[in-house]
């Protein structure tokens, strides 16, 4: 899969999500995604390379370990201009 930070994807719930973080860990790629219309709705998913799908993670200890990594990758990829565009669109 070729998904990057700032990409928008539609998940099986029918909602559009912006990829806010992407991290590779232990031979897996994880994504931190925020619903475009309801920013409180977030998903943390792992890439299933065999089926080319994303699987939502609900393991709280894994999520807790991944959040600092997502923050670091987000800070590198999301610019001040990106935040300004978000403010203009809301």
Image: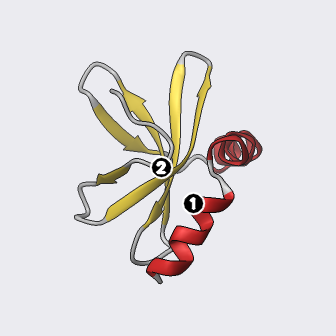
Quarter of the image holding residue 12?
Answer: bottom left
Identify whether 90 is placed above or below 53. Answer: below
Residue picked out by circle 2:
6
Q: Is residue 8 left or right of residue 30?
A: left
Of 67 and 21, nearer the camera is 21
Question: Callout 2: 10 Å neighbours few (<14), some, many (20+)?
Answer: some
Give the image location of residue 76, x and y in percent: 70, 41
Element at label 1:
helix
Q: Is residue 1 left or right of residue 43?
A: left
Decide: marks 2, 1 in contact (CB < 8 A)?
yes
Identify whether 73 is placed above or below 71. Answer: above
Give the image location of residue 19, x and y in percent: 47, 50
Of 54 and 71, nearer the camera is 71
Give how far apart the Cα atoms at labels 2 and 1 are.
9 Å
Residue picked out by circle 1:
82
Quarter of the image holding residue 52?
Answer: top left
In the picture as drawn, the residue positioned furthest to the bottom comes out as 90
Give the image location of residue 33, x and y in percent: 49, 54
> Which residue sits at x=63%, y=43%?
77
Question: Callout 1: 10 Å neighbours few (<14), some, many (20+)?
Answer: few
Of 63 and 59, nearer the camera is 63
């Amino acid at each position: 899969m070729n998904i990057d930070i700032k990409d928008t994807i539609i998940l099986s719930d029918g909602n559009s999500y912006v990829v806010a973080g992407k991290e590779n860990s232990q031979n897996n790629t994880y994504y931190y995604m925020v619903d475009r219309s309801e920013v409180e709705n977030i998903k943390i998913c792992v890439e299933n390379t065999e089926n080319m799908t994303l699987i939502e993670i609900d393991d709280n200890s894994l999520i807790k370990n991944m959040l600092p990594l997502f923050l670091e990758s987000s800070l590198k990829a999301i610019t001040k201009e990106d935040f300004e565009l978000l403010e203009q669109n809301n």
